[in-house]
Structures are given as C-alpha cells and as structure tokens.
Amino acid sequence: MNINYNCEICGNYTYRGPKAFQRHFAEWRHAHGMRCLGIPNTAHFANVTQIEDAVSLWAKLKQQKASERWQPDTEEEYEDSSGNVVNKKTYEDLKRQGLL
C-alpha cells in the first residue's frame, strides 16, 4: 500500500497502491490524457504510463493495421474469358495490351 505509481500520461499524477493504479486506466484523467495525445484508450495500452511508450506503440499498431488492410490492386481478382484468375493490376495490363 505504500507503493507509489506515477503516470506521465495523467500529468505525472501519483497513485497510491496497485489497486488504485490499475483502476486509473479506465478513469477520466487517463482517458483524457490519451485523447490529448490522439491515441484511443484501448486494452492495447494497459499498464502504459509513459508518453513516449504510448506514442511508439500507437505508431506500431497503426502500421500493423495498414498492412492488414485490404489492398484492391493486389488482392482483387479478375477472371478472363478462358477462366484464368489474375489480380487487378495484371488484368488491367493485359486488357490495355489487347490480350484479353
């Protein structure tokens, strides 16, 4: 109970005890600090108290989401009259060359 925890995201607010510290992640002060940083207050950021750590984790999560996002140029498939299945870019190239 005599353990103090600081949270830089909350404006260097000090929480006394592990229970109060864990509870604060769902409270308004931490949520407001995350919102001011432009970061959603989700479960990914549990136990993250440093601004630099939160910003770097958010950048990593955004990059990961962008790579998982559907990319029509490479993932959209077309079928020609012969039954060949190709991606959109290849289909457009073949169509432009008059091979389809």
Image (cartoon, rainbow, N blue to C red):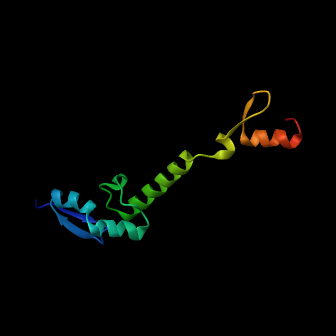
Would you place residue 50 above or below residue 60 in this image?
below
Quick one: 19 or 93, which is closer to the camera? 93
Q: Residue at x 40, y 71 (%)?
A: 36
Identify the image quadrant of the C terminus.
top right
Q: Residue at x 63, y 46 (%)?
A: 71
- Foreground: 16 or 70? 70
Instruction: Describe residue 26's horizontal placement relative to residue 75 as left or right.
Output: left
**Relative to 26, 35 lies left or right:** right
- Most distant residue in the right direction: 98
Instruction: Tell which of 22 and 50 is nearer to you.
Output: 22
Rendered image quadrant of residue 57: bottom left
Residue 11, position as x, y percentages in the image: 30, 72
Front residue of this view, candidates 88 and 14: 88
Which quadrant holds residue 33? bottom left
Q: Is residue 59 above or below residue 36?
A: above
Does residue 1 sit above or below 11 in this rendering?
above
Q: Quadrant of the N terminus?
A: bottom left
Q: Position of residue 45 (x, y in %)?
A: 35, 55
Q: Is 8 located above or below residue 98 in the figure?
A: below
